[in-house]
Amino acid sequence: MGEQKGSQRGTGPIELLRDEFRGHLDLFYSHLKLAAPYDSVEKALGALTTKLKALPPEELHRLTTDRAQRWVHFQQAFIESGLSLKHRGIIAGLTRSGAALGLPPEFNHLLDLYRTTP
């Protein structure tokens, strides 16, 4: 029988940060009423995981309590995965229109990427 991947996952800081980022991406795309580009979402999660695994333990622990620094890493993974290029025209139009997107302020880390030209 095949192994269940989910049952092997721990709840360490990397998994918690990865799950938080996945939740933010789900919220981001659902509020914008867009289908998430799942291949790129998986790339973003992979990029974040790789970066987190390379951090010293004390810095990784600090990220679990420092929301601003977490968003810096989330934004970098969003860019590195190519997510910032997906749905670019639609999201740029929404951000420029002044429409209420209903996203919490921290999502400006992602929305600001669409307010400028690539």
Image: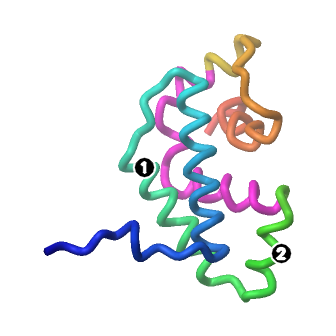
**Is residue 105 placed above or below 75 in the rendered structure?**
above
In the rendered image, residue 45, in percent from the top left (x then y), is placed at 51, 60
> Is 9 one of the magenta-colored residues?
no
Disc 1 marks which amino acid?
A: Ser
Q: How is the image coloured?
A: rainbow
Q: Which mark is residue 31?
A: none
Please state, as top left, top right, bottom left or bottom right, where the N terminus lies in the image. bottom left
Q: Position of residue 52 (x, y in %)?
A: 63, 75
Where on the picture, by quarter, is residue 27?
top right
Q: Give residue 62's mark.
A: 2
Q: Is residue 19 left or right of residue 63?
A: left
Q: Is residue 34 left or right of residue 73?
A: left
Location of residue 53 (image quadrant)? bottom right
Q: Can you say whether 37 is above or below 10 in the image?
A: above
Amino acid type, callout 2: Arg
Spot the residue most to the left: 1
Q: Position of residue 103 (x, y in %)?
A: 73, 29
Q: Nearer the viewer, residue 10 or 90?
A: 10
Dot 1 crowding, Cα within 10 Å, few <14, some 14–19, many 20+: some
| Placement of the C terminus among the 4 image quadrants | top right
Asked if 6 appears above or below 113 in the picture, the reply is below
Q: Looking at the picture, tell me which residue is in the foreground, 10 or 43.
A: 10
- Residue under label 1: 40
Foreground residue, 116 or 48? 48
Describe the element under mark 2 as helix, strand or loop.
helix
Looking at the image, residue 67 sits to the left or right of residue 94; the answer is right
Task: Of the two numbered discs 1 and 2 on the same chain, state the one appearing first in sequence.
Answer: 1
Q: Give the residue displayed 30% in from the left and 69% down from the top.
A: 4
What's the magenta region? 69-92
Query: Magenta part mainly helix, strand or loop?
Result: helix
Write the residue at 39% across / 66% down. 6
Label 2 environment density (alpha carbons within 10 Å; few <14, some 14–19, many ≥20): few
